[in-house]
Image (cartoon, rainbow, N blue to C red):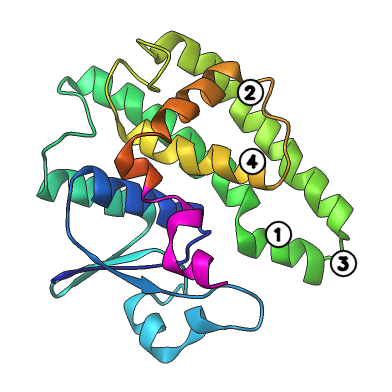
Amino acid sequence: MSVKLYGFFRSSASYRARIALNFKAIPYESVAVDLRVGSNAQRGAEFLALNPEGLVPVLVDGAHAISQSMAIVEYLEERFPEPPLLPRSPQERARVRALTLLIACDIHPLNNLRVLNYLRSGLGQDDQAVDRWYAHWIAQGLGALEQRVQATSGDGRHMFGTAVTLADVFVVPQVYNARRFKCDTTPYPSLTSICAHLEKIPAFAAAAPDAQPEARAS
């Protein structure tokens, strides 16, 4: 098997890559990188040789190692174009990417694990303050996304149009994380309805954190 995915079962960025791989029916080997406190697996020499940032996921396809989930998913889209994750027209592709980047650039980085850990250890914030930080940025981002998707969804089951796109691949892990951190998702009925539909699709269900071997072993 030439394709490997280095990831952590609860990492939303790894979750995105798993969905894309499953959706395109690409066989791959999953390599667990434990990000839990005390592990330091992401700081080992072997993993840092793949990604000096020490971040997951990393996709290895033959001799090529690719980091950053957006780059990974777009690489898979170009290398394995069927079934597609982007519409045909440039205008529609741009609209899907705008939805996707709202999640990848405006929501996720502010609530990334290393940011939350620094708030605690570097800035001395307690769990209550960290939870408020997380909830604030989730509300800001999902609120904007909810407004957008009311205009872009064609059937109330997908983020754009009536088929799975990059935006669907990215929204499911983000809403999963919001629920995991006990954020109130009732103000986002369109997003929660879309995710409820997507999470039932086999490619999405098999990629869920709770379905990974590390989750079952922990």
First to last magenta residue range: 206-218
Q: Position of residue 156 (x, y in %)?
A: 43, 13
Q: Is disc 1 placed on a helix, strand or loop?
A: helix
For label 3, the crowd category at 10 Å Cα-Cα, with few meaning under 14, some 14 to 19 and many 20 or more, is: few
Q: Earlier in the sequence, mark 2 or mark 4?
A: 2
Q: Position of residue 36 (x, y in %)?
A: 61, 73
Q: Is disc 2 placed on a helix, strand or loop?
A: helix
Quarter-of-image position of residue 39: bottom right
For the image, the number of numbered tags is 4
Front residue of 203 and 104: 203
Q: From the image, state whether disc 3 or disc 4 is nearer to you.
A: 4
Q: Residue at x 25, y 18 (%)?
A: 91
The residues bearing labels 2 and 4 have C-alpha atoms spaced at a distance of: 12 Å
Query: Residue tagged by mark 2?
Result: 143
Q: Which of marks 4 and 1 is nearer the N terminus?
A: 1
In this image, 100 relative to 138: left or right?
Answer: left
Please determine whether, in this image, residue 13 is positioned above or below residue 3. above
Query: Residue tagged by mark 1?
Result: 116
Single out the residue that lies furthest toward the front: 216
Query: Residue tagged by mark 3?
Result: 124
Q: Position of residue 92 (x, y in %)?
A: 26, 19
Q: Is disc 3 placed on a helix, strand or loop?
A: loop
Query: Residue tagged by mark 4?
Result: 178
Question: Mark 4 and mark 3 in contact (Cβ < 8 Å)?
Answer: no
